[in-house]
Amino acid sequence: MSLVTGLARYIGANVVGLDWSLADGGNVFEDHQPADPDLSVTVYSTGGPEPQLAHTSNEQRAQLVFRAEPEAATGATDLWWAVFHVIHGLRRVELPDGTKLAWLIVVNGAPVSMGTDENGRMEFSMNVRAEVIQEET
């Protein structure tokens, strides 16, 4: 269970046009953005503040990178907004991998351009912050 895996699977299951899959054919990825397909979302772990030992939850952060062909740059921003509307403000949700969220927010209010990748495809980013409930051991 992790924020990255859970969020990637949640997005793939809840955003039209996106599919998380370990096999070929998916376009939602975790911690690695393959060369294909052109239209994709990759969820990366970005750490967060140190965990509080006495608490049953801790804050975690992730970055999502959206990619589309140059002529379809609006496709990447449209996709950014579609994901934003699905995940921003999630509360008391269990993600598909079992990760339990107290809450999740998108911390930037619009797509952030990252320029183009090595193949000239436009990339945009989104940063999220979440409170993840820890299982007691």
Image: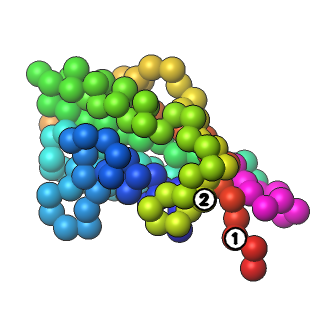
Residue at 47% x, 39% y is 87
Q: Is residue 12 left or right of residue 135?
A: left
Magenta stretch: includes residue 14: no
Q: Which mark, by number, is residue 27?
A: none
Q: Is residue 53 left or right of residue 90?
A: right
Pointers 1 and 2 in contact (CB under 8 A)? yes
Q: Quadrant of residue 23?
A: bottom left
Magenta stretch: includes residue 53: yes
| Label 2 sits on residue | 100
Name the colour scheme.
rainbow
Residue at 26% x, 67% y is 22
User: What residue range appears in magenta?
Assistant: 51-60
What percent of the width, then of the height, locates residue 137? 75, 79
Under circle 2, the secondary element is strand
Q: Amino acid at mark 2?
A: Lys
Residue 52 visible in the picture: yes
As rendered, which of 85 and 35 lies closer to the eye? 85
Residue at 22% x, 20% y is 74
Please, is residue 59 above or below residue 112 in the view?
below
| Label 1 sits on residue | 135
What percent of the width, then of the height, locates residue 88? 52, 34
As rendered, which of 111 and 79 lies closer to the eye? 79
Residue 115 visible in the picture: no
What percent of the width, then of the height, locates residue 64? 42, 41
As rendered, which of 114 and 9 lies closer to the eye? 9
Please, is residue 9 above or below residue 104 in the view?
below
Under circle 1, the secondary element is loop
Q: Quadrant of residue 76?
A: top left
Considering every residue shown, the one lying at the far front of the view is 92
